Amino acid sequence: MTTLIDPVRRTAELICGDNPVELETRLKRDIFNSIARIKPDTTENVDFDSDVMSGEFFSSLSPPLQGIAIARCEGTLAFYNRVGWHPSYLSETLSKVVPEDNIGTFETTYHARSLHDLAYVHPKHFVKILGKAGAASLWEKLKQFSASKPS
C-alpha cells in the first residue's frame, strides 16, 4: 500500500519545519475558499476537518481545480523562501509593512488582509502596484519583519 503525500501539508512542512499545523490549516482553508468561490458545488457537503485537512478533498478535484492548490502552494513556498517565515504572518495586518496608500489595492484586488495573504500575490504584481523601488522596499521590510520576530 502506497501512502500518498499531501502536497499542501508538505508545503507547510518545507516552510515551517517541525510545526506546520497553523500554516497547513491556513493554506487549506484559503485554497478551499478559493475553490468554493469558483465552483461552489464542489465544496458542498465537504467536512473541512475530515475531508480537507486529510488532503482527500484536494486529491478528488479535477486537474484545473487542483491547479489552484498547486499555484497557492508554489506561490507561498516562493514567498517564504524569499522573506523568511514566522507564524505572525498569519495574523499580522498589512499595515505593518505595506505603505498605507497601497493597502486598499491589496485588499480589494487580492483580498489580502494579513501579511500571509501577500504570499498569494505574484511578485510581478508588487512591481505593478508599488513600482520597482517600492516593491524592493516592501520585500526588504518583509525580510526585516521575519528577522525581527523571536521564534
Image: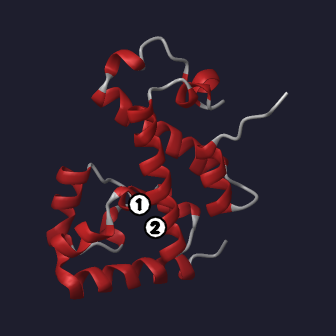
Tell me the residue at 33%/20% (across/down).
40
Q: Quadrant of residue 44?
A: top left
Judge the density around disc 2: few (<14), some (14-19), many (≥20) Cα neighbours within 10 Å.
Answer: many
Tell me the residue at 16%/59% (across/down).
104
Residue beneath label 1, please? 119
85 horizontally vs 141: left or right: right
Tell me where residue 105 appears, x and y as whole percent. Answer: 16, 60
Foreground pick, 3 / 111: 3
Q: Quadrant of residue 30?
A: top left
76 horizontally vs 12: left or right: left
Tell me where residue 28 appears, x and y as whole percent. Answer: 52, 39
Quadrant for the N terminus in the image? top right
Task: Identify which amino acid the numbered label 1 is placed on.
Answer: Ala
Task: Identify which amino acid the numbered label 2 is placed on.
Answer: Phe
Tell me the residue at 22%/88% (across/down).
133
Tell me the residue at 72%/35% (across/down).
4
